[in-house]
Amino acid sequence: MRERAGRIGALEGRLYFLSERSLVGILGAARRIGARALFVDSVQAVLPGIEHSAGSPQGIRAAAFGIREFAKGERIIAFLSSQVNKRSRIQGPRALEHLVDVNLLLEYGKGGERDLKVLKNRYGPAGLSLPLRMEAKGLVPAEGSQVR
């Protein structure tokens, strides 16, 4: 992730990267640096504690719940990336979808096109999508595209 951020010119002094799978380690580091936002890639890889294994339904639920409670307590925003199955459904427990406020899906299309879909939005409309394409500076709206 750090290499990609550097390649698209998104690195700056306030952006920190951590190679950590332990929930305690992730949240402790975020607290130490005074993070205002937290990005976790991917929630299935997080080890929530000794009572659950990473990737198990209970482990995914525990990790997501722990991150959500941390974000609420610290008054920050948290972004969780998640793996999806072949039907484009979140891999893991259905409860994960209920713990989040917004659920986005980035689908890959032909010729490098991608479609960003809003599957759930607790604070606004869902069912919208935006066609995107990859450029040197990252994902940008496709030529002439509109939210639909």
Image: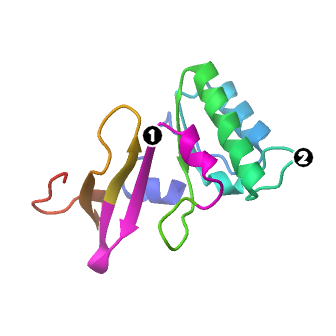
Disc sitting over residue 118 in the figure = none
Q: Secondary structure at mark 1?
A: loop
Q: Position of residue 41 (x, y in %)?
A: 59, 53
At horizontal 15% and vertical 54% (from top left) the residue drawn is 146
Q: Quadrant of residue 82?
A: bottom right
**Res 145 → quadrant:** bottom left
- Is any part of residue 20 visible from this angle? no
User: Residue 87, relative to residue 61: is it above or below?
Assistant: below
Determine whether, in the image, residue 74 is placed left or right of residue 55: left
> Which residue, as the protein is rendered here, is positioned at the far bottom?
111
Is 96 one of the magenta-colored residues?
Answer: yes
Q: Is residue 101 above or below residue 2?
A: above
Q: Earlier in the sequence, mark 2 or mark 1?
A: 1
Amino acid type at image mark 1: Glu
Residue 59 lies, in percent from the top left, at 76, 50
Where residue 40 appears, as percent x and y from the top left, is 59, 46
Residue 53 lies left or right of residue 17; in this view the side is: right
Which quarter of the picture shows residue 143?
A: bottom left
Quadrant location, the C terminus: bottom left
Magenta span covers which residues? 91-115
- The kind of secondary structure element at disc 2 is loop
Q: Amino acid at mark 2?
A: Ile
Disc ID at residue 12:
1
| Residue that numbered label 2 is attached to | 50
Q: Is residue 64 above or below residue 34?
A: below
Instruction: Using the image as rendered, state which of residue 28 and residue 101 is in the foreground.
Output: 101
